[in-house]
Image: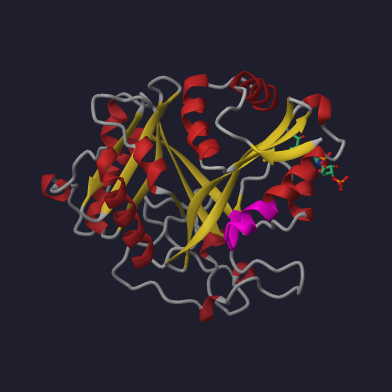
Amino acid sequence: MRIRPLTPGLDWDQYLDLAMRSFGPVDEPRMRANIEPIVAAGQALGAFDGDRLAGSALYLDMRQWWYGRAVPMAGVAGVQIAPEDRAQGVGRALMTALVDYMAERGYPLSALYPATMTIYRSLGWEIAGHRHVAVLPARSLRTLARPDGKSPDDTDRAGIRRPGPDDAAEVLEVIGRAHENARDCGPVSYDEATVRRSLTRPGRYADKDRYAYLAPDGFLGYHWQHGHDEIVIDQLAAASAQTTRALWGLAASHSSVAETARAAWPRCTRAPRSPRCAGPAWPTAAARPRTPPWTPRSPRPPSCSTPFRRTRRRRCARHRSRAGKFDTNRCSRI
Ligand SMILES: CC(C)(COP(=O)(O)OP(=O)(O)OC[C@H]1O[C@@H](n2cnc3c(N)ncnc32)[C@H](O)[C@@H]1OP(=O)(O)O)[C@@H](O)C(=O)NCCC(=O)NCCS
């Protein structure tokens, strides 16, 4: 078995066959449009048995926000080994090579969503955060309360427009500013070429159900799911309460058609322990930079509370953190 970078001359039928046998049915044109630039950029490795593609893995050139600072991050995806080659060490050999490959290219950080932990943990990845998903009745977003008790009005939406491919750099700048202001920990953003591909020209949607809105200080990206049953908010980042509300208001306006709205937020865990030294893997809450009081707070995990309803916090002695602070992640309830 030889491991080498995939090149643009790749036998696409083999790749597709491998992907479908690993993850089930795929949308071929969409997958091809996404993978080809990654292969062309030399960001994918393949495990070959002669000319046969037995496995592959790739990384995306991403940034992850750590206390408001963007850190280069290799986002690993598409890890797939042909069923007949599994449990023979091919996955481990491939991922070991990928780790070296990413390190050689200067990435200090890598992240992935693990389908199984064994292989990744043994190669150095550790659980450092979660992707929290909220699924809400779309109509519950219709009446987003303003601090003054009024409904969102048109002035909130001033300056919001639909971005096209040429706005990719501005979209990244706006998203970056929002995460920086909020000292965010966990969210990720993509490189400009990927963002450019996702911002198809209004009216000419190659990726037919992906839409975006851009404000001077905020961005909303969403798509439809299950036909017209669900609106999936892929990304919503804003630096002011007014724009946050306006962008949620835009997504909520689909409630006449969509039953549910789904939104996800990556967040780092609370002071995870490093397996090497048994100490906190990053600074304690007290040592971290404080979020300025005027920025909107990151939404809390949906299992405990949502940003859409006011929660009444009850003190719970059992869930006080060691520092004596109230652990809102575990105790606040709707
Ligand atoms: C997961 C996958 C990549 C592993 O590849 P593989 O070639 O079978 O892995 P290896 O033989 O090199 O095994 C590496 C380690 O992972 C473990 N492992 C492999 N598959 C596993 C599974 N499904 N569940 C739990 N552990 C698993 C092995 O036991 C081995 O651990 P060990 O060395 O301590 O014994 C492969 O099974 C696959 O392609 N699965 C379908 C797609 C998928 O889930 N991709 C991962 C997306 S994050």
- Write the residue at 49% across / 52% down: 62
For residue 185, side relative to residue 147 (left or right): right
Query: Which one is nearer the viewer's eye here, 142 or 113?
Result: 113
Q: Is residue 35 above or below residue 134?
A: above
The magenta segment is 99-110
Q: Is residue 272 above or below residue 151?
A: below
Task: Give the percent coordinates (x, y) of residue 43.
Answer: 57, 43
Q: Quadrant of residue 22?
A: top right
Q: Is residue 6 magenta?
A: no
The reply to whether residue 142 is in sight is: no
For residue 109, side relative to residue 295 (left or right): right
- Write the residue at 79% across / 27% down: 50
Task: Give the percent coordinates (x, y) of residue 107.
Answer: 57, 59
Q: How many numbered discs sit on the rendered protein?
A: 0
Q: Quadrant of ligand 1?
A: top right
For residue 17, side relative to residue 290 (left or right): right
Of all residues, the one furthest to the right in this rendering is 88
Q: Quadrant of the N terminus?
A: top right
